[in-house]
Amino acid sequence: MAKLSLNRICKSFGKTTILKDISLDIEDGEFVSLVGQSGCGKSTLLRVIAGLETPDSGEIRIDGARVNDAAPKHRNIAMVFQDYALYPHMSVAENMGMPLIMARLPLHARLPLLRHLAPAHARERPGIQRDVAEVARKLRIEHLLDRRPAQLSGGQRQRVALGRALVRDPKIFLMDEPLSNLDAKLRVQVRREISELHASSGLTFVYVTHDQVEAMTMSSRVALMQGGTILQMGAPNTLYGNPDTVDVARFIGSPEINILPGTLENGVVRCGEIALPVAPAGGGGLRSGPVQVGVRPEHMVLETVPELAYPARAGRGLSLTFRKRMIEDLGGEVLVHGHLNGHPEHDVRIRAQKSEAYGSGGSLSQARDWEVRVNPAHILLFDAGGMRLRAEPVLADTHAEPAALQGGLRKKLDLV
Amino acid sequence: MAAATATTASPLQRAQARLAYWLVAPATLLILLIYIVPIAMVIAASLTDYTLVSDYFEFVGLDNYRRMATDDQFGNALHNTFVFAAMFLPAAFVVSLVLAIAIQERKQFRSILEVLYFLPVTSTLAAMALVWAALLDSRQGVINSAIAALGLPPLNFLGSQDLVLFSLALISLWSTIGFNMVLFLAGLTAIPKNLYEAAAIDGADHPLDRFFKVTWPMLGPTAMFVAITTSITAFKLFDVVAIVTRGGPDKASEVYLYLAFLEGFEYFNMGYSAALSLVFLLLILVFAIIQAVVVDRRVHY
């Protein structure tokens, strides 16, 4: 049971402001990722929660109690560091037992020499060993208990660091890029194990990462940070499908979203061949001016063999012409680079199934000009400043004439 | 077959081997001239009754070493050296460690303090020893004036048999702690900061816990190095004795190397002096071996 809330946290080092007025509420049992590029303040925020840094202003509350002035050990938190920070001179068992020794033995029973005179020392040790062994069994590292960290592989060290954090039975689990030192294969495995650990323990997790894939796959909510502020916080799918700003849209999703320059005039968005009438979502007006048009690479559909593919695809879409520059083969999928026809500056990436890109004839990668179809509902609009324009495409209903659309758009917007 | 290939090296291999010998030749020659030959000559001299005043000498076998066992001066010098080391070593170790930790945690003035404590190391000890002799003088010394101002009887720092080794330890300490402190500072700086953070989260945030759980174990290699070099410094004590006390009063500060010097260059017993030097060399060797073995096995993780 631990609810964490941050209220208007500010922190600067000298003249550099790291955290600007951050407020954040994390519910009991949530898995929240703080994600952002390096230098965005995510690690500092985690360290503020841990008590390793004192905020200049603002309040940290754990279960409603203000903990600003509490030492890390009194906050009932555990933390896994990026490079694990295991004590190199201690065995795995000693590393994992450290929090328990600190919590259960008085100072005089912890000091060298003096501890041999302390009865508490002898009384508590078996219990500590038992608890360490139990956590080690859970993490399947009981065969490593006598080894030193230097004798362990990266994945094993990772697990020992988790064990040291788990053994003290914390309320909140803090993790600072715990996977960044692992190789790609191990990272996927440990990612799943951490997710399972979260599910089985029911603890509150706060997880710092620069990798949006980690954040998206593991979290119940993601807080995307940039320049010391939280740009947007929400469920992974909300950040992906409904970003508040162009920066969020760019950061979430891989490969990165295509952003094209366009204009908005009299309720029509124009961008190259696109001319899409839009209406403000939820009322209000739309101001004319330059806009940014975002389409994710996976939402652009290659029409490699139009005659064949046409009837198979349901729904309407904008049809655009596309000039291919190169193809990156990702195995099952391909990433096609090129630009929209007649606009070399409209550089886009398209993600497609390999079979789509190569078609049945297998020769289409030779073709330079392709047709690309986009569902207008997938288009994200941002104003010149990068804020999301809440607008919906105005579409004639399924059987209406293309006359509902304007000018040159008529032949481009297919209604099926 | 193997022998055949070994002897029939290609011309290129032979040329490379010749070049290799030419390349190591200068260094080998220097090591021979500076270390090996002198040591061999000292070993040879220690087996003779060679004196500086006579060209004639005889081979006397191990007589010089046998003489040590019965020589009161040898016993006295060993005793003085160990008494000095017993005072100097712990102080030179603990004081510089405490200073290093205190300075390490400072944000302001850190570099100024580092320079101040390191200054004695850069000074010429022979000259500074004379300054110390003046400061510690029993009648006109500043330190005795201060003691008198407190209403205490003056102390004869350099003239009393009980105090002279203590005073020498004090002077040596002053000249050594700066160096040791810099070594400890280097060791402290190398300790990853996140170990202290992990310790803070684990609950080890008491200064004593921080020291015994993180600082001390992580400082192991540095501490061992400081202990060894300081021990060697202690046993090498010579210049301050030669300048300030000349072994006095009444041989109370006659330490091992000063005895070797006296025997060789005052009494001209080069053979005996060479034997004393060799025993000293063995003593230092023991410390070097301890360092090589213990440090590698116990202190590195």
Image (cartoon, helix red, strand yellow):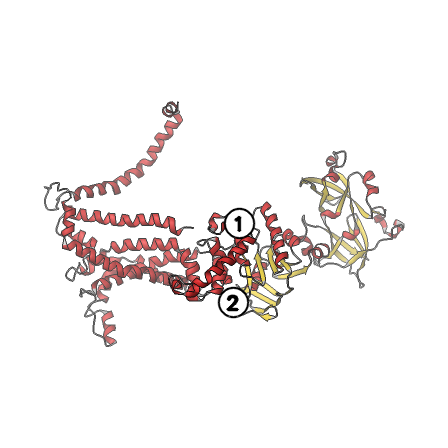
Q: Position of residue B151 (x, y in %)?
A: 23, 77
Q: In this view, does B196 lie to the left or right of B232?
A: right
> Secondary structure beneath disc 2?
loop
Q: Residue furthest bottom?
A: B151
Quarter holding the N terminus of chain B is top left
Number of marks drawn: 2
B276 shown above or below A14: above
Q: Count residues near mark 2 (Cα–Cα under 10 Å), then give few for <14, some for 14-19, many for 20+.
A: some
Q: In this view, does A85 lie to the left or right of B138?
A: right
Q: Position of residue A288 (x, y in %)?
A: 78, 59
| Residue at (25, 50) in percent of width and height | B283
Task: Give the spatial CA distance, label 2 vs label 1.
Answer: 29 Å
Q: Name the residue under label 1.
A: A156
Q: Name the residue under label 2.
A: A71
Q: Do labels 2 and 1 share a chain?
A: yes
Q: Which chain carries label 1?
A: A
Quadrant of the rendered structure where residue A107 is? bottom left
Using the image as rendered, state which of residue A319 and residue A22 is in the foreground. Answer: A22
> Secondary structure beneath disc 1?
helix
Q: Position of residue B247 (x, y in %)?
A: 17, 58
Nearer-N-terminus badge (2/1): 2
| Residue at (34, 57) in percent of width and height | B180
Q: Where is residue B56 in the image (x, y as percent from the top left)?
A: 9, 41
Residue B264 seen in the current view: no
